[in-house]
Image (cartoon, helix red, strand yellow):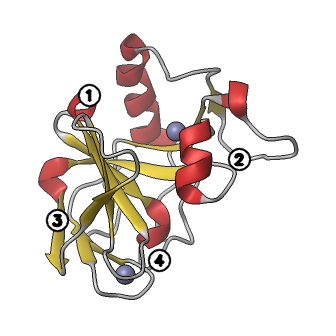
Amino acid sequence: MSHWLLPWTASCLCGRVKMRVTEAPAVATACHCKACQKLSSGPYSLTLLLPAAGFEVIEGATEIGGLHSPDVRHHYCPHCKSWVYTTATALAGFVNFRATMLEDASWVMPFVDMQIADKLPGVVSGASRSYPGFPPPEDYGSLMEAFAKEGARPG
Ligand SMILES: [Zn+2]
Ligand SMILES: [Zn+2]
C-alpha cells in the first residue's frame, strides 16, 4: 500500500511558511491533552507523525512558541502564529506535523485518540483506537503497522 499521492504541500494560514512532505506518515493521531487544547485553541490537536527525512520547510522560517522547552519545540509562523509542527527529543527521527496545514487535508482522519482522560464532552474524532494517556512505547510498532494497512489516505 503506497497509495499516498506524495509529495504534499502545506502552509500556515498566511502562506509565509511553506512545507513539503515526501514520505508517508507513520500514524495519524488526535491528542486531547490540556496542552494541545490550549496550543490548538480547539478540543484536540490533529497530528501526522512524519519521518523527519520526509519533511522540510521550503519557504519562510518558523519561530518557537508554546512553553519554549528545550525538549519540546513548538514551531510557529512568525507572522500569522499558526502552530505548524513540533519536534521533541522523545520523537527522535520524527516530526509531529499539524495536519490542518496541508494544502489538502480533506482525507486526514485520526487513527488513534490519545489522552482521552482529558477529552472534552461531546468530542468525537473518529479514531478507531484510543488510550487514556500516551500509547505505551511497546504499542507504537503495531499501531504503525496497522496504520500502514488501514489508515486513511488521500484519493
Ligand atoms: Zn503564517
Ligand atoms: Zn497533546
* Discs 4/1, front: 1
Density class for disc 4 (Cα within 10 Å; few <14, some 14-19, many ≥20) is: few
- Residue at numbered disc 1: 90
Q: Residue furthest left?
A: 53
- Residue at numbered disc 3: 56
- Residue at numbered disc 4: 104
Pinpoint residue 9: horizontal percent, then vertical percent.
Answer: 30, 77
- Residue at numbered disc 2: 126
The residue located at (50%, 46%) in the rendering is 151
Pinpoint residue 141: horizontal percent, then vertical percent.
Answer: 35, 22
Q: Is residue 134 above or below residue 46?
A: above
Instruction: Give residue 6's quadrant in the image.
Output: bottom left
Who comes first in sequence, dot 1 or dot 2?
1
Q: Is residue 26 above or below residue 86?
A: above
Pinpoint residue 86: horizontal percent, then vertical percent.
Answer: 32, 50
Whether label 2 touches label 4, CB < 8 Å: no
Who comes first in sequence, dot 3 or dot 4?
3
The residue located at (38%, 45%) in the rendering is 67
Q: Residue furthest right?
A: 122
Q: Is residue 151 above or below residue 84?
A: above
Who comes first in sequence, dot 2 or dot 4?
4
Query: Identity of the amino acid at label 3?
Result: Glu
